[in-house]
């Protein structure tokens, strides 16, 4: 733990930890955000010209996207050119007082700038380094460029996503990046826990996360099913092969409900709830194979029932029966849902968008740790907002050196 950050009586689990983020876009910033949510001081280095490109993503007005505001929460922004000698020296000085460095450049980039594992380890032998890249730090493909999209494709996720008669689909979120960020945090905490136990390690402590491996790890028995059964999974829309009944069903008010009735006990309760006692009593349907063979029949029976009433009534009936179900929500529905609000998963913050403050709702913190809840102290900062503070207090640079970087101090 970084000694000068220790706060007696602190309640956030990661208070006292300092994290340096050298990444951009999603993967490394998502990992660093998780540290910041639970009390770590997170310092984000951004290129002086434009900063992280995420600042422009899905932005229709103003100067900074809500995606960046979300991903950059609880972080300090430092505008610094890592390719310059002064930038390199400043980073090494910050690293000397840092616990974790997280980066997601293409392998070899930091080494080219004189900021590779050996240099960082020399500056701080206790440092943990998280390296997230498309294909990892080793292997024949290590030097390939890799984004979450190509990782999801290479890992097999895109092949099995979407409708069977259409090209490969995707989840409308950066799954490959975020899951790799999660693995990066887990790996860093493992090494930090080991260090806290007094285990000595030689050389740089590195967590090597490949985007495609994070995605591949989510695909359960994709390859084992191929070896054992000759099964090559295909695109099946909203259904999962062999998992019946489950999926999205239409309701009488043109809304949709997702129902999971694929365990034996839940299946029986579901059939009784929809008035099909005959199916509930059919012993041949108490196996995954039996239900799979009659998937069309079962889905038809469920759809006929859900279509006969509005979504709210469907949900009430299924809740009473103890059947897992959920509405297919859009953003407005989520933003006003009483359960989201009760668990503080929708939090309002003031944002300057077009020179005027506006109240914007942002996602809350996961997971919930009673007595040690994470927090959003501030949303993503302006580019270079903390440059003078960090370079002066941590890197020990003079005002003249900081001014030579061409960064104006924020008021």
Image: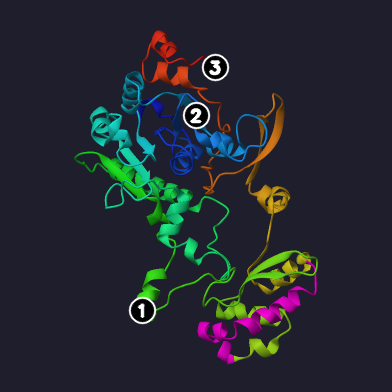
Residue sitting at x 45%, y 43%:
31
Quadrant for the C terminus, please: top right
Q: Is residue 108 left or right of residue 357?
A: left
- Can residue 376 be seen from the camera position used here? no
| Residue 309 is a magenta residue | yes
Give the Cα distance between marks 2 and 1: 49 Å
Which type of secondary structure does the marked residue at label 1 adopt? helix
Location of residue 283 by image quarter: bottom right
**Picture layout, residue 196 above or below residue 182:** above
Q: Nearer the viewer, residue 169 or 342?
A: 169
Q: Looking at the image, which is closer to me, 240 or 38?
A: 240
Q: Which residue was labeled with disc 1?
A: 228
Task: State the CA–CA distance, disc 2 to disc 3.
Answer: 15 Å
Q: Secondary structure at mark 3?
A: loop
Please state if 232 lies on the left or on the right of 353 as rendered: left
Label 3 sits on residue: 410
Q: Are the residues tagged 1 and 3 within 8 Å (C-beta)? A: no
* Pointer 1 or 3: first along the chain: 1
Q: Position of residue 46 (x, y in %)?
A: 46, 29
Residue segment shown in magenta: 283-310
Q: Is residue 43 above or below residue 142?
A: above
Give whichever of 353, 367 is nearer the camera. Answer: 353
How dense is the environment of label 3, judged by Cα within 10 Å: few (below 14), some, or many (20 and up)? Answer: few
Give coordinates of residue 219: x percent, y percent. Answer: 44, 64
Of callouts 2 and 3, the N-terminal one? 2
Main secondary-structure element of the magenta-colored stretch: helix
Frontmost of labels 2 and 1 is 2
- For label 2, the residue is 51
Other residues around mark 2 within 10 Å, as few (<14) / some (14–19) / many (≥20): some
Identify the residue at horizontal 38%, vertical 21% (top origin): 394
Residue occupying image coordinates x 65% and y 84%: 297
Seen at 57% across and 87% down, the residue is 285
């Amino acid at each position: 733990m970084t000694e000068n950050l220790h706060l007696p009586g602190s309640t956030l689990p990661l208070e006292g930890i300092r994290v340096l983020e050298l990444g951009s876009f999603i993967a490394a910033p998502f990992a660093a955000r998780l540290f910041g949510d639970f009390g770590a001081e997170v310092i984000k280095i951004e290129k002086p010209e434009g900063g992280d490109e995420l600042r422009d993503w899905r932005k229709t007005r103003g100067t900074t996207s809500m995606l960046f505001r979300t991903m950059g929460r609880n972080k300090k922004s430092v505008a610094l050119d890592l390719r310059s000698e002064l930038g390199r020296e400043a980073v090494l000085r910050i690293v000397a007082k840092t616990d974790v460095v997280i980066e997601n450049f293409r392998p070899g980039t930091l080494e080219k700038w004189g900021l590779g594992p050996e240099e960082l380890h020399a500056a701080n032998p206790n440092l943990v380094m998280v390296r997230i890249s498309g294909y990892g730090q080793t292997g024949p493909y290590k030097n390939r460029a890799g984004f979450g999209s190509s990782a999801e494709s290479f890992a097999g996720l895109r092949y099995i996503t979407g409708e069977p008669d259409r090209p490969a689909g995707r989840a409308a979120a950066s799954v490959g990046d975020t899951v790799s960020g999660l693995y990066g945090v887990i790996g860093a905490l493992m090494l930090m826990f080991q260090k806290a136990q007094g285990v000595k390690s030689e050389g740089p402590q590195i967590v090597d996360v490949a985007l495609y491996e994070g995605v591949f790890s989510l695909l359960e028995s994709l390859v084992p099913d191929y070896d054992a059964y000759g099964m090559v999974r295909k695109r099946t829309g909203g259904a999962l092969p062999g998992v019946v009944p489950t999926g999205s069903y239409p309701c009488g008010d043109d809304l949709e409900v997702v129902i999971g009735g694929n365990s034996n006990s839940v299946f029986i309760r579901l059939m009784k709830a929809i008035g099909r006692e005959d199916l509930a009593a059919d012993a041949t349907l108490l196996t995954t194979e039996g239900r799979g063979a009659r998937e069309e029949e079962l889905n038809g029976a469920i759809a006929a029932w859900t279509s006969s009433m509005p979504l709210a009534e469907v949900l009430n009936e299924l809740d009473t029966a103890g059947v897992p179900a959920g509405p297919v929500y859009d953003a407005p529905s989520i933003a006003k849902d009483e359960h989201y609000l009760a668990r503080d998963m929708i939090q309002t913050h003031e944002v300057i968008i077009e020179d005027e403050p506006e109240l914007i709702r942002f996602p809350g913190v996961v997971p919930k740790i009673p007595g040690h809840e994470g927090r959003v102290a501030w949303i993503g900062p302006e580019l270079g907002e903390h440059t003078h503070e960090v370079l002066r207090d941590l890197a020990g640079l003079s005002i003249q050196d900081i001014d030579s970087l061409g960064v104006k101090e924020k008021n």
